Image: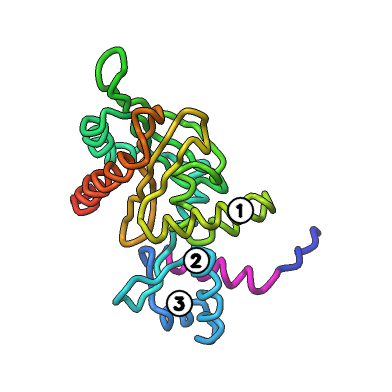
Amino acid sequence: MASVPKRIQSIVRSAAILEIMAQQGGSARLGEIAAKAGMEKTTAHNILQTLDHLGYVQRRPGDMRYHLGGRILNLSRIMGDDHDLRTRMRPTLEAIARHSGATVHLGVPSGDEAAYLDRVDPHAAQGPAATAVQRREAIEGSAVGLVFLAFVPGMGQRVLSTRAHALDGRVREQIEAVRLSGYALDLESYRPGQNAVAVPWREHGEVRAALALTGPCADLPRARLVRLAWMMMTHVARATVQPC
């Protein structure tokens, strides 16, 4: 008979809590979670606090329930299909591309990387075109990556667990600037001769994706990127309030 592997109780309880929340439609109150998991409220609360810190669950303003967080989607996205998100956001990408005349990308967090799901190039040979892409890049350095590092809970810890020196003092300053301004700038730091600006897209207050506008630095100087950031946030806000 095969031996039963040793189980770590805290991991077993954490998995149980996440499964209970999923079974309840993605959210549940502390008392409900503790009762269904068969554990004390204090124990359930401590586990939920840790999961919240890591981004696997989240609390929303004015809501007593715990909700499954973006890290759950992040993990599933590594092997998942983002067709629905791509379809939903494509009109926004196209509107931003028309307004700016620059190429627009849709990126999502995927493990400790950024995965690019879609791209709209207004200068394509056949006219404005949307092209599905499946490219992955390191988080640190790019405008999209800075958005995720600033607003996706647990992303910084995830990057540091695989690249211990990835987030130096300069990057940390950039992350704080993104938190304050709401957008991220990349001035030739990721690709020579290319500038970019990225803004987050939120669902239920949680960042699920980022939209980035890129182009030659001569066409997109810093001052113009800042103006375009506000334009992009306006379009993203319209997409957020539209019914799914």
Residue behind mark 3: 33
Q: Quadrant of residue 179?
A: bottom left
Q: Would you call the spot at circle 1 few (<14 residues within 10 Å), some (14-19), or many (20 or more)?
A: some
In the displayed structure, 65 sits above or below 101; it is below
Query: 80 and 187: which one is in front?
Result: 187
Apparent side of residue 111 relative to residue 6 in the rendered image (left or right): left
Q: How is the image coloured?
A: rainbow
Q: CA distance from mark 3 to mark 2?
A: 9 Å
Residue behind mark 2: 18
Say which label, 3 or 1, has the lower sequence index: 3
Give the magenta part as a residue range: 8-21
Q: Residue at x 48, y 47 (%)?
A: 109
Q: Amino acid at mark 1?
A: Leu
Q: Which quadrant is the N terminus positioned in?
A: bottom right
Q: Quadrant of residue 6?
A: bottom right
- Residue 32 image label: none
Q: Is residue 87 magenta?
A: no
Q: Amino acid at mark 2?
A: Leu
Task: Give the foreground label among 3 and 1.
Answer: 1
Residue behind mark 1: 167
